[in-house]
Structure formats: C-alpha cells, structure tokens
C-alpha cells in the first residue's frame, strides 16, 4: 500500500515536473555556469518562431518553483521594465531511492 508523500518525495516530484520538458533542459544548458538575461536565453535558444517571451517566462517560473534556477539580478533596459537575469540555483540533483534523506 502506498503512503502519503513525504517531504522528500514532494521535492523529487517538483524536480520531475520541472524537468519533463526539453525546453527546460535547453534553458538549463543555456544558463550553464553563467548568468543570462531572459532576452539572452530567448535569443540563444532561437525561440522566436516557436514560443513567445511569455512562454519562456512560464518555463523559467516552473524551474524557479522547483529550486533549479533563481533570479540573480535585474538589468536596466532602456525605457522599460528591468529585465531578470537568471542563474542556476541547483546544479546537481542526487536521489537515493532507499533513503528518506536527500543526498547532496
């Protein structure tokens, strides 16, 4: 019989939901060890024909909620709203399937 999900299981589920999409893996690879603005990510991934900027924000938000990326800073944009600059918050995820504690 299955039990209620433990906090550890919930964290793992958040990671799985966030990482199920190839676009999100592309975002992670694009950011890498650097910091990238939303516009830089959009342009480097060549998303102009496939997705809007709002669509990219949707994916970034999912990665942020899972604790995989975070806003590093804001960049002033000429005559507009400051642009978010992103970086990886989590670089490695290790799951021990038999232990209740997360392996770091």
Image: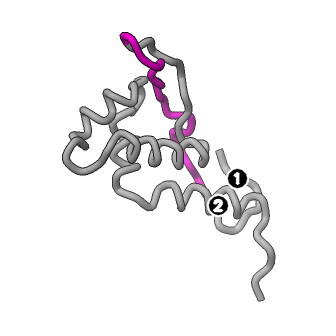
In the image, residue 89 lies in the stretch drawn in magenta: yes
Image x and y of residue 29, in percent: 35, 40
In the image, residue 29 lies in the stretch drawn in magenta: no
Labels 2 and 1 touching (C-beta < 8 A): yes
Question: Residue 102 got which mark?
Answer: 1
Q: Give the residues drawn in magenta, as a range.
A: 78-94
Q: Residues within 10 Å of mark 1 (few under 14, many from 20)?
A: some
Instruction: Pick whichever, 25 or 60, lies toward us.
Output: 60
Residue at 42% across, 17% down: 80
Q: Residues within 10 Å of mark 2 (few under 14, many from 20)?
A: few
Residue at 32% across, 44% down: 52
SS assignment at label 2: loop
The quarter of the picture where the C terminus appears is top right
Instruction: Pick whichever, 63 or 76, lies toward us.
Output: 76
Residue at 50% across, 18% down: 74
Count up the numbered dots.
Answer: 2
Where 11 sits versus 57, above or below?
Answer: below
Image x and y of residue 91, in percent: 51, 39
Image x and y of residue 32, in percent: 39, 33
The quarter of the picture where the N terminus appears is bottom right
Residue at the bottom extreme, as displayed: 1
Image x and y of residue 3, in percent: 80, 79
SS assignment at label 1: loop
Give the mark, 2 or 1, whose residue is nearer the N terminus.
2
Where 38 sits versus 52, above or below?
Answer: above
- Which residue has dot 2 on it? 96
Instruction: Pick whichever, 57 or 5, lies toward us.
Output: 57
């Amino acid at each position: 019989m299955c039990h209620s999900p433990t906090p550890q299981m919930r964290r793992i589920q958040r990671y799985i939901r966030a990482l199920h999409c190839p676009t999100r893996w592309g975002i992670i690879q694009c950011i890498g060890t650097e910091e990238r603005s939303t516009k830089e990510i959009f342009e480097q991934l060549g998303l102009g024909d496939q997705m809007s900027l709002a669509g990219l924000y949707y994916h970034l938000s999912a990665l942020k909620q899972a604790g995989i990326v975070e806003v590093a800073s804001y960049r002033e944009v000429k005559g507009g709203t400051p642009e978010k600059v992103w970086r990886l918050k989590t670089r490695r995820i290790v799951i021990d399937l038999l232990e209740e504690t997360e392996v770091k």
